[in-house]
Image: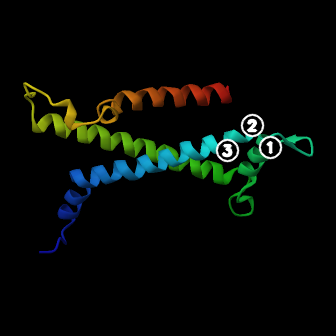
Amino acid sequence: MTCCSSSCKRSLLSSTIALKAQMAVTGLILYGFVVMHMVGNLKAFGGEINGVPMLDIYARYLREMGEHLFGHGGVLWGVRIVLLLSLLLHVEAAVKLKSRNLESKPIKYRIFDYRASTVAARTMLVGGVFLFFFVIFHILHFTT
């Protein structure tokens, strides 16, 4: 049986599997940014080239990258938009999945087997909230 109606397609896009895929893809985008951001910032320890710090050269490259197509700093704004959309979609999926989880079993288990999940999985929400506030602090620290 094929799914041709718009309501069927809508239900597929809002399914639990689709939401988990959405979280995975947006999580990979956010993780990739954190890794690339860290690697870029390691240039602060790279010394100088012709008297110019490597971090300054890297910062200039980021602003001028794709300048002939998108204008000065255009690629950076594109990356910022992708990151913001990824963050919003990631949080949206997390909230929907958590609410579905709570609705599916409103009565908690009497005994919870913590061996069935990892510490990372159990503390994901706390880590996400901490990371969110750190990012806000980090942005404000370097832009104000």
Q: Position of residue 11 (x, y in %)?
A: 19, 57
Q: CA distance from mark 3 to mark 2?
A: 8 Å
- The residue furthest right is 50
| Crowdedness near tag 1: few (<14), some (14–19) or many (≥20) residues, C-alpha within 10 Å | many
Q: Is residue 96 left or right of residue 89?
A: left
124 versus 81 height, above or below? above
Q: From the viewer's side, name the closer residue of 139 and 108.
A: 108
Quarter occupied by residue 121? top left
Residues tagged 2 and 1 counted as in contact (Cβ below 8 A): yes
Q: Is residue 59 left or right of residue 48?
A: left
Tag 1 residue = 54
68 versus 92 height, above or below? below
Q: From the viewer's side, name the closer residue of 126 and 102.
A: 126
User: Is residue 14 in view?
Assistant: no
Residue 40: give its label.
Answer: 3
| Secondary element at tag 1 | helix
